[in-house]
Amino acid sequence: MTSTSEDPPRSAAFRLGLLVVLVVVILACSATAVTLWATRSDAEGDTQAGREAVMAQTEQFVLRAFAYSPELLDDQGGMPEYRERVGEIITPKFSASFEESAGVAEQLVTEAGVSRVPDVFATGVASLDEDSARTLIAGSLSDTYTVDGVDMLGTLTGTSGGDSVTALRNGACTGP
């Protein structure tokens, strides 16, 4: 493109001013990027480590709380080893609620000979703060038990989010 007499002249002062403005903008962007990178990496690392710890604890809870069999029964029909292994990973606040549900598990094992094996497909964290977390779980429970001398197998597959079950599929019960 050629210059015409109608184009305003570009002066050295204008070019120098433009260069200074561009250098300031580049420095400001660089400083902002470095600051964000430095502060985010620490916070995200802590948050991610916290999420991973919560997911591991959730998986352990499912594997411990939903795994039982007649081998765990003592002479009085209780499952002290079951209660102990779950008690190791729950909070005191949740302990009272667990004690009620442990009685149901003991009753299932005592009366029906139920053996339950959980399988955790995946865990996730819906929310996390200083003293609580809401987790997501996908997995299955496989039960074996005897009905009128016939061994049965039942499976239940589902996902759970927070306090509710969001999807549940009952597999077939099979026997001979």
Image (tube, rainbow, N blue to C red):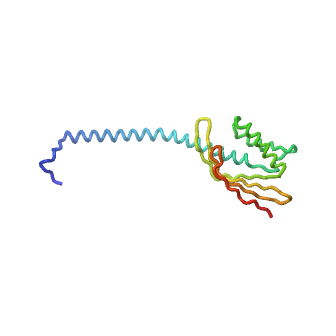
Residue at x 16%, y 44% (from the top left corner): 8
Q: Is residue 66 visible?
A: yes
24 left or right, relative to 63? left
The quadrant where residue 171 appears = bottom right
Residue at x 73%, y 39% (from the top left corner): 97
Furthest toward the left, the residue is 5
Q: Give the vertical position of 131 relative to 152 (above or below).
A: above
The quadrant where residue 50 appears = top right
Residue 22, horizontal then vertical, whole percent: 29, 41
The quadrant where residue 132 appears = top right
Residue 40, horizontal then vertical, whole percent: 48, 40
The foreground one among 118 and 134 is 134
- The quarter of the image holding the N terminus is bottom left
Residue at x 86%, y 58% (from the top left corner): 148
Q: Is residue 138 visible?
A: no
- The quarter of the image holding the C terminus is bottom right
98 left or right, relative to 160? right
27 left or right, relative to 79? left
Furthest toward the bottom, the residue is 176
Q: How many marks?
A: 0
The foreground one among 135 and 166 is 166
